[in-house]
Image (tube, rainbow, N blue to C red):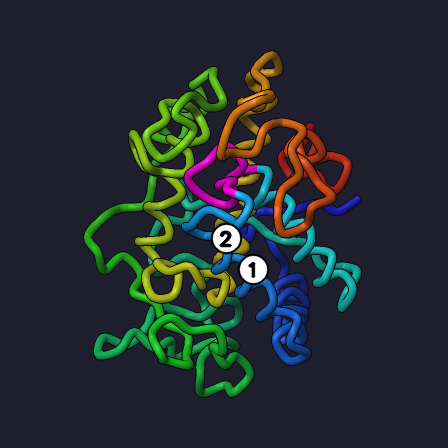
Amino acid sequence: MTVRKNQARLTATEKRRFVDALLELKRNGQYDTFVTTHNGFIMSDTDNGDRVGHRSPSFLPWHRRFLIQFEQQLQAVDPSVALPYWDWTADRTAGSSLWAADFLGGTGRSRDGQVMDGPFASAAGKWPVNIRVDGRGYLRRELGAGGQQLPTRAEVDSVLAMATYDAPPWNSASDGFRNHLEGWRGVNLHNRVHVWVGGQMTTGVSPNDPVFWLHHAFIDKLWADWQARHPGSAYLPAAGTANVVDLHDTMRPWNNVTPADMLDHTRYYTFDTAA
């Protein structure tokens, strides 16, 4: 069984193997297919009218499926690799260990945001940014430059306390756990972290930055924590809702998986905090 670990607890060998698997997926072209998929489902409705990846109830099951597929590709390269998660309530500064040169590298230089150290820096020659929205072919970050702080544990707990998964109108105006976690209302968790990192993480091509996977692995963990805290609270909407993905509707682009299929993460992986 795959166990997803807090990145702060990874050994030097685990970090190296994770990085090496990422670099291999970039080298063989598979990595960029994930960037393209995310960009295609980030904002607009899909061609069948259903909002899928963001600003809708399926935000969490869609990304859970997306991460599982990516993790399986990493494991095809190295079966020992699992997606780590970044607990940004604890590792809250640009000096945290995940930004070290032996892992993800640090923030970008002031004039253009270009990341200058670590395995994903342009100078290392192994991480070209091919799927672009700004014409620049290098990884960019501006850690904390926007003035906002990363979310606190108290803010996370306030969202985990919400008992209803989602609510009409099932979009960025909804008042429920999903939308508060996604960040369009309330204390703003997921969205704020993207903005704090800056660079490509503020765009639809955010998976260009490998930290995307660590961030979303933590968002996925928070959903799992919420599910454990509210066992009687179901995914909503259940059925018959226009323009969103109901519990048993298939999710694009896969067309063979529903939110119901994604409710039990333990079929695929556990977290290092599991009892």
**Magenta segment: does it hold 93?**
no
The extreme front residue here reads: 48
The C terminus sits in image quarter: top right
Contact, mark 1 vs mark 2 (Cβ under 8 Å): yes
Q: At which x and y percent is residue 108?
A: 32, 73
State how far apart marks 1 and 2 are (Cα). 7 Å
- Secondary structure under badge 2? loop
Asked if residue 3 lies left or right of residue 38, the reply is right
Q: At which x and y percent is residue 215?
A: 48, 50
Indicate which disc residue 37 carries: 1
In the rendered structure, which amino acid carries the disc numbered 2?
Phe
Q: At which x and y percent is residue 258?
A: 67, 36
The N terminus sits in image quarter: top right
The extreme left residue here reads: 147
In the rendered structure, which amino acid carries the disc numbered 1?
Thr
Q: Is 194 above or below relative to 175?
A: below
Viewer-nearest residue: 243 or 173 = 243
Q: Is 35 above or below relative to 165?
A: below
Majority secondary structure of magenta residues:
loop
Residue 18 placement: quadrant = bottom right
Viewer-nearest residue: 151 or 251 = 251
Q: Which residue is painted at 30% across and 32% down in the image?
A: 187
Q: Residues within 10 Å of mark 2 (few under 14, many from 20)?
A: some
Query: Which residue has dot 2 on it?
Result: 41
User: Which range of residues does the magenta coloring cover?
Assistant: 49-60
Q: At which x and y percent is residue 167?
A: 43, 21
- Secondary structure under badge 1? helix
